[in-house]
Image (spheres, rainbow, N blue to C red):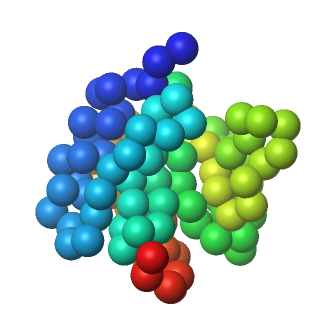
Amino acid sequence: MPYNEAIEARIKSIVSGWQNTDSKKMFGGVCHLLNGNMFCGVYKDFLILRLGQENADRALSLPSVKPFDITGRPMKGWVMVAQDEFENDSALKAWLNQAKKFVRTLPVK
């Protein structure tokens, strides 16, 4: 199944104004990078986010959020968010800002 291009367009409209971002095709979808570190993307119909372990654990308490696991080994600190958690742009922006905040703590690549 290809990735949801509508989700990608919504992400791109938000992060295109951020400095030091880039995007790459990965995981059969698209990932966005901040300072060389992946922070979000689209996998099938899911928003994927790098939140760090503590924030990811908190997010997993929501019914529409699950671990980012496409290989049988979940990626630590990453989550997959179903569309009902980001139906409007302010909700999407809030999720993206959480990932941005965490990734800014990582060394620049």
Kindly indicate the quadrant of the structure image that contains residue 4: top left
Q: Which of the image's four quarters has the C terminus? A: bottom left
Is there any visible trace of residue 53 in the rendered image? yes
Q: Which of the image's four quarters has the N terminus? A: top right
Above or below, 43 against 94 in this view is: above
Give the image location of residue 96, x and y in percent: 40, 59
Q: Nearer the viewer, residue 62 or 92?
A: 92
Q: Nearer the viewer, residue 87 or 27?
A: 27
45 left or right, relative to 10: right
Extreme residue toward the front, this view: 109
Q: Nearer the viewer, residue 65 or 25?
A: 25
Question: Residue at 73% across / 47% down in the picture?
Answer: 67
Above or below, 66 against 14 in this view is: above
Above or below, 70 against 68 in this view is: above
Kindly indicate the quadrant of the structure image that contains residue 68: top right
Count of numbered badges drawn on the protein:
0
Question: Residue at 38% across / 46% down in the picture?
Answer: 24
Give the image location of residue 91, x and y in percent: 37, 52
49 left or right, relative to 76: left
9 left or right, relative to 82: left
Question: Residue at 48% across / 60% down in the picture?
Answer: 38
Extreme residue toward the right, this view: 72
Is there any visible trace of residue 62 in the rendered image? no
78 left or right, relative to 105: right
Give the image location of residue 86, x and y in percent: 42, 43
Question: Residue at 50% across / 85% down in the picture?
Answer: 107
Extreme residue toward the top, this view: 1
Give the image location of residue 45, x and y in percent: 50, 27
Above or below, 71 against 104 in this view is: above
